[in-house]
Image: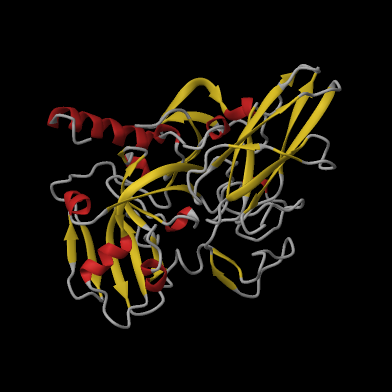
Amino acid sequence: MSDLSRRDAVKAIARFGALVAAGGVVRPGTSALAQDDPVLAGRPLVRFPEKTDLILLTSRPPQLETPMKYFDRAITPNEAFFVRYHVFPIPLEVDLATWRLRVTGRVDRPLELSLDDLKTRFPRAAVTAVNQCSGNSRGRFSPRVLGGQWGDGAMGNAEWVGARLKDILAAAGVRQGAVQATFDGLDRPAFPSVPDFVKSLDIARIMDDQDILVAYQMNGAPLPMLNGYPARLVVPGWYATYWVKNLSEIEVVDGTFEKFWMRPGYRIPDNACGCVTPGTAPARTVPINRMTVRSFIASPRPGTRVAAGRPITLKGIAFDGGYGIQEVQISTDGGAVWRRADLGADLGRYSFREWSTAWTPRQPGPARVLVRAFNRIGESQSREALWNPAGYLRNVIEHFDLQVG
């Protein structure tokens, strides 16, 4: 954005606003139906500014899903990275001459930080981490639950670069008795009845974790506007609800913040599995936090016809909430026999881990391939999907079907 002339920038911003308001550009003759996925069937592919063709869930606010073909690799391209906003309108432009990240509340030295301040006043830190919507795969819950009916593509993995949040708070001087910090972005609801999207983290959690960043770079480039330009919160291992985009204010508070998006929003049952019997409500809830173990098959696509007796390569990714992936296993006989897949490079405990394996189908007819992952403390995926009323924490063994012959 900064390398555009003033005239070009005005044109780009005007185009961006018009496209977002219109719901993006629908690609002629394209839809997600080709993915042979009943959750995504009939949804159009759309192209928003700085983005390639993504699957449209809603346009106001933008909710755009990444097609599964991008998950055959560890790093998700910026242009293909999913988009999830909670309120509308969203920010369409940022003037870096006036933008400041404000740090207020129970601090000794309130701060107003420019983008240059973030880059020069604090040590540069980097982490490769998965950003996954809490409701990723909600469309697969049975019984069905309320909320955006995502397929599996509300996730992505990137290298994030920025300033450590603990360093920023240390520069502000957190006062004794402070309990949490809250985070607000530039998106603002159009009506007073709609709660502003504000999230919180414990001060102790922040000061204990050097990987929580205020990031200004994504995969070696400035953040796309729809992914949080000019800076966003990065909370590795935790769901994307905490990764506040277009960050504008951090407030240190002396109590537990419990406004809408922390309570009642984004809560899970207060038990070991985060689940309840389908159709029931939990007795107690807690804020959603660490991600579960997940693994996916990205290539070939479901429904692909393959030849009997000829080897094919299966590829995909696995990840968890920060312990790191130890092993990925594949079954081609409905789960009776499992064998190890080959793992790709380890980009860090918060990252996607690529996996691949060669398979030669022998018998013509339908074939089902299953994948499961294990992290370094032995957590894996269950055969049966667990249920909760918000449609969170899915980590069932995933499968896809091919036609042999």
Residue 309 visible in rendering? yes
Q: Quadrant of residue 251?
A: bottom left
Across and down, in percent, residue 159 comes to 40, 43
Residue 246 visible in rendering? no
Across and down, in percent, residue 370 comes to 74, 39
Across and down, in percent, residue 289 comes to 52, 62
User: In the orientation shown, which residue stands out farthest toward the bottom?
Assistant: 177
In this image, 319 relative to 213: left or right?
right
- 367 in relation to 244, above or below: above
In the picture, the quarter occupied by the C terminus is top right
Q: Please name whichever residue, 130 or 353, is drawn nearer the observer in this view of the structure.
A: 353
Q: Residue at x 37, y 72 (%)?
A: 203
Which scheme is used to colour this image of the protein?
secondary structure
In the picture, the quarter occupied by the N terminus is top left
- 291 in relation to 140, above or below: below
Q: How many badges with numbers are in the image?
A: 0
In this image, 54 relative to 283: left or right?
left
Q: Please name whichever residue, 80 or 95, is drawn nearer the observer in this view of the structure.
A: 80
In this image, 359 relative to 127: left or right?
right
Q: Residue at x 36, y 69 (%)?
A: 207
Q: Please name whichever residue, 5 or 114, is drawn nearer the observer in this view of the structure.
A: 114
Across and down, in percent, residue 334 comes to 82, 39
